[in-house]
Image (tube, rainbow, N blue to C red):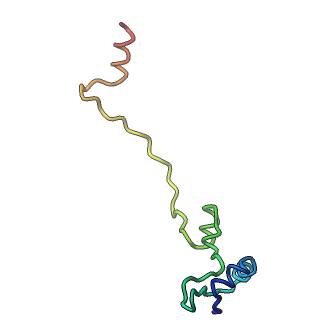
Amino acid sequence: MERIAIRELRNQASQVVRRARAGERLVITVDGVPAAEIGPVGPAERASSLQELIATGAVAAARVRTAARPAQPAPAPSGRSSLDVLRQLRER
């Protein structure tokens, strides 16, 4: 991995990014000490849809698709159905 001083990065940022985009990994140094790394973005980071994420292996597809179960109404505390309550309210 090639080392690049922060000053060189500042002066040639677009060229360094092009190199990274082409697949090269570069270490950025500050006063000769490694501080950061720049490199290509992997396929999982580039993916933007679920199908692309599945294709890159970043996520796994659901094994079985099942229909959602119909909602079961909760019984009212009074024991009466909502239909009975609505009928009573409408008759007033």
Q: Nearer the viewer, residue 83 or 48?
A: 48
Expressed as whole percent of the image width and height from the top left, the position of residue 28 reads 61, 85
Question: In percent of the image, x 61 and y 70: which residue is there?
Answer: 45
Query: Can you tell which quarter of the image residue 46 is in?
Result: bottom right
Question: In percent of the image, x 34 and y 19: which residue is there?
Answer: 84
Q: Is residue 61 left or right of residue 73?
A: right
Expressed as whole percent of the image width and height from the top left, the position of residue 72 reads 37, 38
Residue 21 in view here: no
Query: Can you tell which quarter of the image residue 40 is in?
Result: bottom right
Q: Nearer the viewer, residue 81 or 50?
A: 50
Q: Nearer the viewer, residue 54 or 83?
A: 54
Question: In percent of the image, x 66 and y 83: which residue is there?
Answer: 7
Q: Is residue 13 above or below residue 83?
A: below
Q: Is residue 89 above or below residue 34?
A: above
Quadrant for the C terminus in the image: top left
Expressed as whole percent of the image width and height from the top left, the position of residue 57 reads 58, 73
Q: Is residue 19 left or right of residue 83?
A: right
Q: Nearer the viewer, residue 48 or 87?
A: 48
Residue 73 in view here: yes
Most extreme residue toward the left is 78
